[in-house]
Image (cartoon, rainbow, N blue to C red):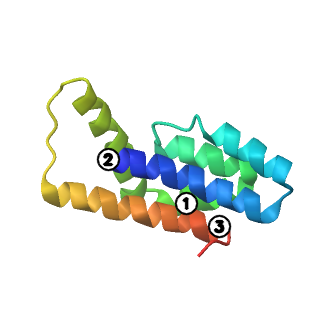
Amino acid sequence: MISGFLENCVRLTYAEYATSRSDSSVANFVERNLRGFQNPRMNLILDTAGMFSDDWRKALKAQTEGQLGESVNSIVTNRHQIVHGKSVQLTLHLLIQYYSDAIKVVELMRQQCGLH
């Protein structure tokens, strides 16, 4: 569920930015391209930010190095393990930490986009 939440937040954040800052045809283009956004590993989120601005990518990378980026990657890794019927070593405490870190990453993205 957290992986889906993160996918939707990335899509919605950048689509909202495009809608607020550009012509409707550009916003539609961005929205359509983001529809295929899946498996929100940190490098994919950074690449998406970089499509809007190299500076955004660099800043987001610096802000998410360490625990935040690792949590995002763990969310996707654990999702894949579960989907393929493999065991995972998740505790409720760890799951809450991953979710909290995912929210922080979304907040950083929204700040970059000027969305509060």
Q: In the image, is residue 37 above or below residue 100?
A: above
Going by the picture, which residue comes out furthest to the bottom?
116
Q: Nearer the viewer, residue 57 or 32?
A: 32
Amino acid type of disc 2?
Answer: Met
Q: Nearer the viewer, mark 3 or mark 2?
A: 2
Q: Nearer the viewer, mark 3 or mark 1?
A: 3
Asked if residue 74 lies left or right of residue 25, the reply is left
Amino acid type of disc 3?
Answer: Gln
Q: Which residue is mark 1?
A: 62
Q: In the image, is residue 11 above or below residue 86?
A: below
Asked if residue 83 lies left or right of residue 4, the reply is left
Q: Position of residue 27 (x, y in %)?
A: 77, 51
Q: Which residue is mark 3?
A: 112
Q: Which numbered disc, 2 or 1, marks the residue that appears first in the sequence?
A: 2
Q: Position of residue 57 (x, y in %)?
A: 65, 54
Q: Which residue is mark 2?
A: 1
Q: Residue at x 63, y 46 (%)?
A: 48
Q: Nearer the viewer, residue 16 or 106?
A: 16
Asked if residue 4 lies left or right of residue 83, the reply is right
Disc 1 crowd, CA 10 A, few/some/many (<14, 14-19, 20+): few
SS under mark 2? loop
- Label 3, label 2: how far apart the Cα atoms are: 25 Å
Q: Which numbered disc, 3 or 1, marks the residue that appears first in the sequence?
A: 1
Q: Residue at x 34, y 50 (%)?
A: 2
Instruction: Confirm or deny contact between disc 3 and disc 1 (CB under 8 A).
Output: no
Instruction: Confirm or deny contact between disc 2 and disc 1 (CB under 8 A).
Output: no
Q: Residue at x 68, y 45 (%)?
A: 31
- Label 2, label 1: how far apart the Cα atoms are: 26 Å
SS under mark 3? helix
